[in-house]
Image (spheres, rainbow, N blue to C red):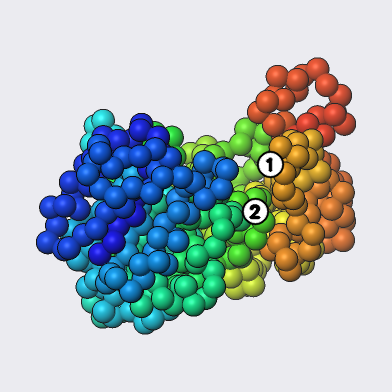
């Protein structure tokens, strides 16, 4: 097999040495090529290709594409990884085993795992808007597999036939580019995002399909702890046992660059939202519940919380903390709530993701108790933080049409218009200042606060 390892500079050389020694200890015949901006042949005794495919140093990982294309007939397996990803013989053997039962358009992949100083695991790939696709759960032989929407694990394995197929697609051996992911991550995900292969994680055999991210750089910063991760994988196994394909509430990821304005499954409770829930509220409905930070906080305050989750996987933690979960798609969940009333309804950064936001507001507005508010947290796509970010990054990150972006343009005017069309009145919108502008919150006028805000909160009530 041919192994290509991207290694820019020398900061990870101690990890690179360990990885090379790991490959050399395997029972497989292995050729190793290091891709770097400096010559590492003498130091590690391997082949080394020096230079980046473009002027951007982050393009270095794309060098493996030309290498694999040139040597596609010389090896049975092709492995790419970054220089701090430890792929073991056990990983490779397990990968070969599961590939025997997968159809040609499905491919097994890995998740990264890290270890803190106390030995506790961290799963850095599980964060932000990335999530398990509950409808993708399937059995293949003795395996239960599911698709995780973050395809990046800084490594992949391809057979000779899979590489040939990827090359035939015309979208593997390509110039450095980015889109859903940045340059570094795109190089490791192209086989899945644009070459016709769908990545699945063997959930039933996770120990064999996790690879150690040796730098442990995200511990305590980004990722899921074992308790949360185990809840999710347990839910996936239960779905497989039931033999069902449960619906998700909505398509929560946008098609904008880097998934801009996608729903964050792990967003924390926002004080500006909490303080606008009526003090006397005894019942709250949350539409689009993720991991449930806001909902769990409300339960702790003695409030009865009912939630329609994004999917049946992410909501396990909220359910354990006392949140009543109403699973299903939007229409089915609404039917199950018929005849009930709530003192407050929350829609936290999901309204712009529904194809027909007016219909959603109209349908659920009927569940409001007299004079009860619906609180809508939305991205402020016309605010200065959003405009500045686009200028800085040199790319458009706002939706032009829902069909193209899987998101509506969200600003004060649109959200208030949707509310009025749905028969809601007394609409009032306030800004949630960007963290860099928070210090100015008490000294700038209200109209300027909204302009300086990356998010906004609209409060509306049903017309009496």
State the image coordinates of residue 377 (x, y, percent, origin top left): 70, 45
- Residue drawn at the location 69% of the way across and 31% of the way down: 434
State the image coordinates of residue 138 (x, y, percent, origin top left): 37, 76
Of marks 2 and 1, the one in the foreground: 1
Left/right placement of residue 289 relative to residue 28 reads: right
Q: Which mark is residue 257?
A: 2
Q: Nearer the viewer, residue 193 or 29?
A: 29
- Residue drawn at the location 87% of the way across and 61% of the way down: 421
Left/right placement of residue 423 relative to residue 261 reads: right
**Residues at discs 2 and 1 in contact (Cβ within 8 Å):** yes
Quadrant housing the C terminus: bottom right
**Residue under circle 1?**
393
| Above or below, 271 relative to 394 | above
Quadrant housing the N terminus: bottom left
- Residue drawn at the location 34% of the way across and 44% of the way down: 83
| Mark 2 / mark 1, whichever is N-terminal | 2
Can residue 44 be seen from the camera position used here?
yes
Badge 2: residue crowd in 10 Å (few <14, some 14–19, many ≥20): some
Can residue 200 be seen from the camera position used here?
no
Q: Nearer the viewer, residue 199 or 45?
A: 45
Badge 1: residue crowd in 10 Å (few <14, some 14–19, many ≥20): few
Number of marks in picture: 2
Give the secondary structure at mark 1: helix
State the image coordinates of residue 376 (x, y, percent, origin top left): 72, 48
């Amino acid at each position: 097999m041919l192994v290509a390892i991207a290694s820019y500079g020398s900061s990870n050389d101690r990890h690179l040495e360990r990885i090379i020694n790991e490959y050399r200890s395997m029972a497989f015949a292995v050729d190793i090529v290091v891709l770097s901006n400096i010559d590492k042949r003498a130091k590690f005794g391997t082949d080394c290709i020096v230079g980046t495919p473009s002027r951007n140093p982050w393009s270095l990982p794309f060098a493996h594409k030309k290498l694999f294309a040139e040597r596609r007939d010389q090896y049975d397996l092709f492995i790419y990884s970054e220089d701090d990803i430890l792929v073991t013989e056990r990983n490779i053997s397990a990968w070969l085993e599961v590939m025997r039962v997968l159809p040609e358009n499905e491919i097994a992949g890995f998740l990264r795992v890290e270890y803190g100083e106390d030995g506790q695991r961290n799963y850095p790939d599980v964060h932000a808007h990335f999530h398990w696709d509950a409808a993708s759960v399937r059995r293949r032989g003795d395996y239960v597999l599911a698709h995780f929407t973050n395809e990046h694990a800084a490594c992949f394995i391809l057979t000779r036939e899979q590489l040939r197929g990827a090359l035939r697609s015309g979208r593997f051996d390509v110039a450095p580019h980015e889109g859903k992911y940045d340059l570094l991550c795109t190089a490791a995900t192209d086989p899945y995002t644009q070459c016709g292969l769908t990545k699945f994680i063997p959930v039933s055999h996770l120990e064999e399909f996790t690879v150690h991210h040796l730098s442990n750089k995200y511990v305590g910063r980004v990722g899921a702890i074992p308790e949360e991760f185990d809840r999710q994988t347990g839910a996936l196994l239960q779905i497989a046992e039931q033999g069902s394909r449960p619906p998700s509430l909505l398509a929560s990821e946008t098609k904008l660059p880097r998934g801009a304005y996608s729903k964050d499954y792990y967003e924390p409770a926002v004080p500006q939202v909490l303080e606008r829930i009526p003090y006397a509220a005894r019942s709250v409905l949350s539409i689009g519940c993720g991991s449930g930070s806001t909902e769990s906080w409300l339960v702790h305050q003695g409030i009865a919380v009912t939630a329609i989750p994004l999917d049946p996987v992410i909501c396990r933690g909220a359910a354990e903390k006392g949140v009543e979960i109403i699973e299903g798609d939007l229409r089915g969940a609404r039917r199950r709530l018929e005849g009930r009333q709530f003192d407050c309804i929350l829609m936290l950064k999901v309204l712009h993701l529904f194809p027909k936001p007016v219909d959603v507001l109209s349908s659920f507005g009927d569940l409001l108790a007299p004079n009860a508010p619906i609180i809508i947290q939305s991205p402020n796509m016309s605010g200065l933080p959003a405009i500045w970010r686009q200028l800085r990054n040199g790319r458009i990150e706002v939706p032009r049409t829902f069909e193209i972006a899987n998101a509506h343009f969200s600003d004060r005017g649109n959200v208030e218009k949707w509310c009025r069309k749905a028969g809601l009145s007394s609409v009032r919108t306030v800004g949630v200042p960007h963290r860099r502008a928070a210090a100015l919150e008490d000294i700038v006028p209200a109209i300027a606060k909204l302009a300086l805000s990356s998010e906004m909160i609209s409060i509306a009530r049903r017309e009496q």
